[in-house]
Amino acid sequence: MLGYTGKFKKEAVASVLQAVDKFPMPTAEGIGSAQREVLRMNTLRRASYIYTAIQRVEKELANASAHGVPNDEAVTTVNALEERYFRAHVQAAAQRILAANKVDGLQWKYGDVLGWYAVKDAKTSKDCLAADGKNFSAHVPPVIGWPGVVHMNCRCYPGKPHKRAEMLP
């Protein structure tokens, strides 16, 4: 694995697992293609989060130690910080599930091809603007992901397919 040092401190692992243990992965089975894909994606992202979080906590604890911060104080500070990161991780996972539910629900209404709709304002990302007005498969996510999944707080949404519109890759 990239970046693995083999020196994960017991405190780093305990800190991350303490945060993750507060919200275990829900056991669910998606009823539609998008839900199943997002549940798989969320599981992979949880594993990635844990690995990255342990590295992040270990680095913060080492940095605190190098600056003479007592270990108990450093662990408390790092735990609080990691809990904020973990809440954001859980929020993003929930956002992806809600977006997938919309895709699956609209597939029943409009079929296997849906339209991409972006909220257009100063906050809209370039990827979302580029996808707006195009169509996508309700079964296989476009390269950028489904509407509402592209980035944190994505405001894009699926809807009725656009007539004669280009399909997103």
Image (spheres, rainbow, N blue to C red):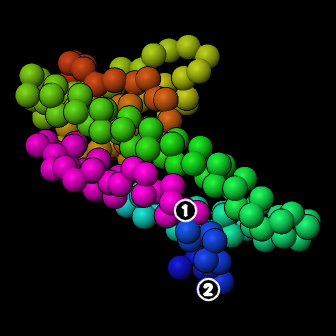
Where the C terminus falls, by quadrant?
A: top left
- 94 left or right of 32 in image: right
Q: Which amino acid type corresponds to the residue marked 2 in the rendered image?
A: Gly
**Mark 2 Cα shell of 10 Å, populated few (<14), some (14-19), many (≥20):** few
Residue 152 visible somewhere in the drawing: yes
Q: Which residue is mark 2?
A: 6
Residue at 27 percent across and 50 percent down: it is 26
Q: How many marks?
A: 2
- 8 left or right of 140 in image: right
In the image, residue 93 sits, relative to residue 132, either above or below, namely below
**Element type where label 1 sits in the image:** helix
Percent x, y for residue 18?
Answer: 51, 60
> Do the numbered discs 1 and 2 sit on residues whose CB atoms are within 8 Å?
no
From the image, give the main secondary structure of the stretch colored magenta: helix
Residue found at the far front of this picture: 72
Q: Earlier in the sequence, mark 1 or mark 2?
A: 2
Residue 136 visible somewhere in the drawing: no
In the image, residue 97 sits, relative to residue 7, either above or below, namely above
Residue at 56 percent across and 71 percent down: it is 13
Q: Which residue is mark 1?
A: 16
